């Protein structure tokens, strides 16, 4: 178990793979932690050193007072890289983690070789929807939303065929800090990267889920159309494409990162 001390928070991280290999950073979705990337570790550590971390407010990282912002969560990544003395890395983020990648790609491109933005958009949801989610979680805890979130994240067919994997995700959601979750909901609510997409000049792969109700395909394609060096891939999955379409995800992302 490893921690990096930043200015006002402590980030939990895991670093796996050959010490001399290039580093790829994985950034988790809202309500999960670094364990959501377990399906990637074996395949990616054949070629990379894999750095996974718990976003502020999640897992075993600090739950500092909210609300958080996309800028704050993105600067946490830069602080983690500085603490580990990593100059440039590859980056892969899903949903909220993808918004972090957009911020870094536009404002700190010198720290990235390439970026992979999965199941994410430049603007996600409405203020009203996020405020309702925040209120519900603060009043009733994570169990009040976890099951409904899970239904949007994984297709019914996948949930039926993979009960163990599905339950792992559910447990992550149910055990997330309500305050940390609410603070990160505010970050997603307030983030709007639409005007910055043209500044993302690092080679970028957009990964979309064909059955993702949280991020419509049009929103994912919008990213690819407005980034100068973006490619687009659509997988047969809902929101957690890295889990539901694990093999296809790993193949597509590794091919992009290693090309």
Image (cartoon, grey):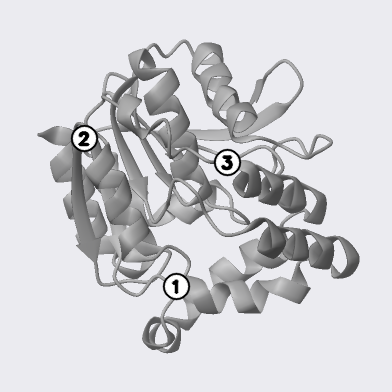
**What is the x, y in percent for residue 216?**
38, 66
Question: Along the polypeptide, which appears first: circle 1 or circle 3?
Answer: 3
Q: Is residue 184 left or right of residue 254?
A: right
| Residue occupying the point 17% across, 53% down | 251
Q: Counting other residues with Cα less than 10 Å from the Cα at mark 1, is it few (<14), some (14-19), or many (20 or more)?
A: some
Q: Which residue is mark 2?
A: 47
Q: Secondary structure at mark 1?
A: loop
Q: Work out whether residue 17 can be spotted.
A: no
Foreground residue, 35 or 176? 176
Q: Nearer the viewer, mark 1 or mark 3?
A: 3
- Frontmost of labels 1 and 2 is 1
Tell me what residue is drawn at x 44 percent, y 75 percent.
154
Q: CA distance from mark 1 to mark 3?
A: 19 Å
Q: Is residue 41 above or below residue 24?
A: below
Q: Is residue 51 above or below residue 121?
A: above
Please tell me how crowded label 3 is: few (under 14), some (14-19), or many (20+) other residues with Cα within 10 Å.
many
SS for tag 3? loop
| CA distance separating discs 2 and 3 | 33 Å
Q: Callout 2: few (<14), some (14-19), or many (20+) C-alpha neighbours within 10 Å?
A: some
Residue extending furthest toward the left: 259
Disc 3 target residue: 191
Q: Nearer the viewer, residue 197 or 208?
A: 197
Question: Which callout, 2 or 3, points to the residue nearer the camera?
Answer: 3
> Which label's residue is closer to the chain start, 1 or 2?
2
The first of marks 2 and 3 along the sequence is 2
Q: Which percent across, then down, holds residue 61?
A: 69, 37
- Whether pointer 1 and pointer 2 mark residues with C-beta atoms closer than 8 Å, the reply is no
Residue 165 visible? The answer is: yes
Identify the residue at image location x=44%, y=19%: 107
The quadrant of the picture occupied by the C terminus is top left
**238 with respect to 30 (left or right):** left
Labelled disc at residue 213: 1
């Amino acid at each position: 178990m490893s921690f990096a001390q930043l200015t006002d928070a402590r980030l939990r991280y895991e670093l796996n793979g050959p010490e001399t290999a290039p580093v790829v950073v994985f950034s988790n979705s809202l309500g999960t932690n670094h364990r959501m990337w377990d399906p990637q570790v074996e395949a990616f550590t054949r070629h990379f050193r894999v750095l996974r971390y718990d976003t502020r407010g999640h897992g075993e990282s600090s739950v500092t007072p909210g609300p958080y912002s996309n800028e704050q969560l993105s600067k946490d990544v830069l602080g983690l890289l500085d603490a580990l003395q990593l100059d440039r890395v590859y980056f892969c983020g899903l949903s909220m983690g993808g918004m972090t990648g957009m911020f870094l790609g536009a404002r700190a491109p010198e720290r990235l070789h390439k970026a992979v933005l999965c199941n994410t958009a430049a603007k996600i949801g409405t203020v009203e929807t996020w405020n309702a989610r925040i209120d519900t979680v603060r009043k009733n805890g994570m169990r009040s939303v976890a099951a409904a979130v899970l239904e949007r994240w994984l297709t019914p067919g996948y949930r039926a065929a993979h009960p163990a994997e599905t339950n792992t995700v559910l447990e992550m959601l149910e055990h997330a800090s309500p305050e940390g979750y609410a603070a990160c909901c505010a970050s997603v609510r307030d983030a709007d990267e639409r005007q910055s997409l043209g500044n993302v000049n690092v080679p970028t792969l957009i990964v979309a889920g064909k059955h993702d109700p949280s991020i419509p395909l049009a929103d994912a394609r919008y990213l690819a159309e407005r980034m100068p060096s973006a490619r687009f891939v659509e997988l047969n999955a809902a929101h957690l494409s890295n889990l539901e379409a694990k093999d296809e995800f790993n193949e597509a992302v590794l091919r992009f990162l290693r090309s």
